[in-house]
Amino acid sequence: MVLPMATRTPRIAVVDDDPFVLRGLRRLLRSAGFDVDTYASGAAFLNAGGDDEPDCVVLDLHMPQTTGFEVQAQLVKRGRSTPVIVITGGDDPEAQSRALRLGAKGFFGKPVDGEALLATIDAAITTRRAQSGWGRP
């Protein structure tokens, strides 16, 4: 996989309450050349603060307290344009439809196909950068 050209390494936030998923996705994304921040809950991600938003968020839907749907809604409410890619162990058409309506750029059931996830992240980042003009010569 070739990362989009830019002045810095793209940073991916992974939000999932399963420590094994966090660890596995961190390894996969780092091996593909991304910087990775992990969050064990939706609230931890939303409360992380700062103006330096990630280039993409890989987000579990079904977490205790703050669900992935709630995280997506908060990102929209805050005016964030960060691409979101949803992963879930409860893969059903209604959840997929709802996640996509909230702006998800991809939807994957667990276990996640690593190559497909990397391709979707790459496409989401490339599209966002092209739309914003970021990374152009």
Image (cartoon, grey):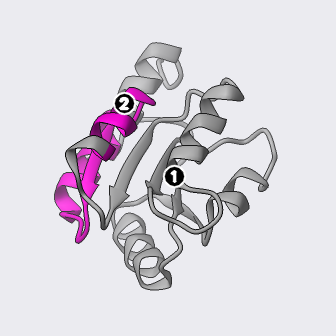
Q: Is residue 50 above or below residue 44?
A: above
- Name the residue rendered at 34%, 33% in the picture: 100
- The amino acid type found where label 2 is placed reads Thr
Measured from the top left, where is residue 58 in percent x and y?
Answer: 44, 54
Q: Is residue 64 above or below residue 104?
A: below
- Read off the magenta span: 95-123
Q: Is 127 left, or right, of 115 in this rendering? A: right
Measured from the top left, where is residue 65 in percent x and y?
Answer: 65, 64
Name the residue carrying label 1: 68
The one of 46 and 7 positioned closer to us in this rendering = 46
Quote the CA–CA distance across marks 1 and 2: 23 Å
Q: Is 126 left, or right, of 53 in this rendering? A: left
Q: Is 66 left, or right, of 89 in this rendering? A: right
Q: Are marks 1 and 2 in contact (CB under 8 Å)?
A: no
| Residue density around tag 1, few if under 14, some if 14–19, many if 20 or more, within 10 Å | many
Q: Looking at the rendering, which quadrant does residue 66 occupy?
A: bottom right
| Residue density around tag 2, few if under 14, some if 14–19, many if 20 or more, within 10 Å | some
Taking the magenta stretch, the answer to whether it contains residue 133 is: no
Q: Is residue 49 visible?
A: yes
The mark nearer the N terminus, 1 or 2, is 1
Name the residue carrying label 2: 126
Q: Looking at the rendering, which quadrant does residue 125 occupy?
A: top left
- Name the residue rendered at 72%, 42% in the picture: 52
The one of 105 and 31 positioned closer to us in this rendering = 105
Q: Looking at the rendering, which quadrant does residue 39 occupy?
A: bottom right
